[in-house]
Amino acid sequence: MAGAALVLSMAVPAGAAAGEPVNGAIAFSGKRLGKPVIYLRGLEPSRPRVLPTRGWARQPAVSPGGRRIAFTRRGRLGAQIWSSYLDGSAMTQLTSGPQDFRPRWSPEGDAVVFARGAAGRRDLYRVRADGTGLRRLTFARADDRNPSWSVTGRIAFVRRYGKAGHVYDIAATGGRARRLTGGSDDDRWPAWSPTGRTLVFSRGRSSRRDLYLLSSDGSHTRRLTALPGAEDEPAWSPDGRWIAFTYRSDGRTRLYLLRVGQRPVARLGSHRLRALGSSRSDPQSPDWQAAGTDPVVAAAGDIACDPRDRNFRGGLGTGAFCRQRMTSDLLLRMDLDAILALGDLQYTDGQLWKFQQSFDASWGRLKPLIRPAPGNHEYKDPGAAGYFDYFNGPGQPTGPAGTRGQGWYSFDVGSWHLIALNSECTHASGCGAGDLQAQWLRGDLAAHPAACTLAFWHSPRFTSGEYPAGGTMLPVWNELYAANADVILNGHEHFYERFAPQTPAGGADPARGIRQFAVGTGGRSRFRYTTVAPNSEVRRNDRSGVLRLALEDGAYRWQLVAAPDGAVLDSGETSCH
C-alpha cells in the first residue's frame, strides 16, 4: 500500500469554480416524533431545524450553491426524488419512483444522480433538476448504489455482487464502469473530495467499519480512522479539510466531524474529532452545505401566453411561441437568490385568472423568488389589477410588486443594490425628473451607495428593434448614471441584446457607462431586429432563454442560457465602477 503518496490537494481543477469555499451547515436525516425528517444544523452548538419537506423524507443532498436540497420522499406510491429550496419553496418532484433513493447533485447543480430499483438489483440514473431528461447510466446484473458526482465529471458508486461491494466510477454521461477498489473487504459510501482528486469511503464489516482515502484512479489508499465502532456515510466539507460521518457503536448513532490528517484517528477523544449533536434523533446521511457562494439572479421578460392563445397547448407551446414552461425549467436547474421578471409577464392583458392558469403553472413554480416589474400588457387590465393581485394578494395595497399605482421598490442581493422601476409612465404618475418615481429613485440611490447597482424595468431606452422607449426613461438613466450604476435590464423587445457601457445619451463610456441588456426571451414569442443600434455588441433572437447573473463582490458575470438544453449563447464578466 502506497498510502504515504496519497495527500489531499486543494488545487481547483480546470472548469471548477474559483474562490475558497466556506463551510456552512450540515443537513442530515433523523427522526422527530418517530417520523423521518431532514434536519439542518450549524457547526456551532445550536438546535437543528427541521426542513419543510411536506412528508416522509430522508437522504438529503445540498446543492453546490447551498440554496437547494434534493432528498428521497416516500408516500403511498413509493419513494421518489424531490427537490426544494431550503425554505421549502419551489418543491419539485424529479422522479416517478417507486424505488428511487440517495440523490446527489451534479457540480453545476442542474442535474441529480440517484439509485433506482429493488435491493440487490439497483441501477444508477440521472435526471435534470426540473424533472426532465431521465437517463439510465448502469446496466450491470448487480446492485449499484450510493452515487457521488465529481467536479471532473465522474460518478463514483458502490457495485455489489453478493455480500461484498466495491467502489466503481463511471462517466456522468454513462459508458463502461471502472473498478477502483478490490479485495474481499466490503466497501461502501464513496464521496468525492471538492477537487475530484480523491474519494473517501467506508470499509469493513457491519460492526467495525473505518474510513479510507482513495486516489481518483484507485491506485492508492490510506486509512483515516481506526475507531472501535462503525464509521459510514462520509461527506466532505466544502473547503476539503473536514469529513462529516455517522459513527455507530453500542446500538447508537451520532454525527462526527473528522479533521483530515496523515495518521488514522484511533480514539474518540482525539483533537481531530468533534461530535456534532446527540444520538437521540438517530442521525444518518449527512451532507455539508457550501456557504458564502456568489449570489445568483436570473432575468427575462415577455413570458407567459394567454391561455386562449392557439399556441398555448396546455402550457407547452409550439415552435417559437408560448415557451414559458421551457424557460421556467431553466430556472429550476439553477441555484438562485432572486428571479427578475422584466414585464409583460402575462399576455394578453394580465388578468388574474390568466396569471393563475399560465404564468403560475410555469414561472409561478418559483414565485417566492420572483421580483417583478410591470409591462404594458399588465396595464391592459386597468391599473394592472391582475398583476398586483397575483404578486401582492387580491386587493392588497402593497407587497412584493411594490405599491399599487407605483410598482417600484428596491432590495439588496449580497453586496449589490437592485431597483425595480415602472416604465409604463402614464400609469405610474410620470417618469419625468420631477415626478414621484424619479424623486423616489434619487432618494433610494442616496440611501444605498452600494459599490454595485442594478436596475430593471420593462421598456428599453436603447434597442435594435422596433419598440424603443425613446426619451421617456431618460430621467431615470440620468439618475442611475449620476450614481454610478452598473447594469440595466429590460424586456419588451422579444429578443436578447447586450450593449457596451454607455451614457444616457448613448455615447460609449467604458469607464462609467451603464451596460444595458434586453432580455425579452421569456417564451412568449420572438421579434426581428431592424437597424443595429450604436454600441450594440451581441444580438440573439433564435432561442428563448434567461439571463443568469452572478453578482460578485465588486463584479458580475453573465450567461445567456437557452431553452431547453441550457446552452450558453453569450457570456462575459466585468467589474463594477
Image (cartoon, rainbow, N blue to C red):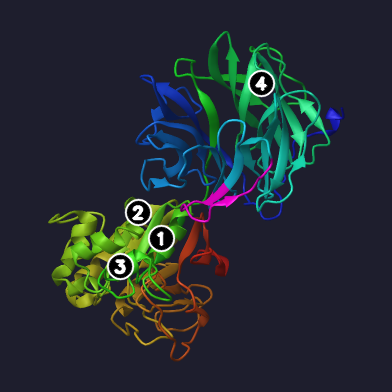
Mark 3, Cα crowd under 10 Å, few <14 / some 14-19 / many 20+, is many
Amino acid at the residue labelled 2: Arg
**Disc 1 target residue:** 328
Question: What residue is shown at x 47% (from left), y 52% (from top)?
Answer: 131
Residue 143, percent from left and from top = 65, 34
Q: Is residue 29 magenta?
A: no
Are discs 1 and 2 less than 8 Å apart at CB? yes
Magenta highlight: main SS: loop
- Label 4: which residue? 272
Count neighbours of disc 2 (C-alpha within 10 A) and say few if under 14, some if 14 to 19, many if 20 or more: many
The mark found on residue 365 in the picture is: 2
Whichever of labels 2 and 4 marks the residue nearer the N terminus, that label is: 4
Find disc 3 in the rendering and name its residue: 345
Residue ID at (36%, 67%): 456
**100 relative position to 172: left or right:** left
Tag of residue 126: none
Q: Residue at x 40, y 84 (%)?
A: 505
Give x and y (percent) for residue 37: 41, 28
Q: What residue type is labelled 4?
A: Arg
How far apart marks 1 and 2 lie (CA) works out to 8 Å
Q: What stretch is highlighted in magenta?
A: 126-140
Residue 407 visible in image: no
The answer to which of marks 1 and 4 sits earlier in the sequence is 4
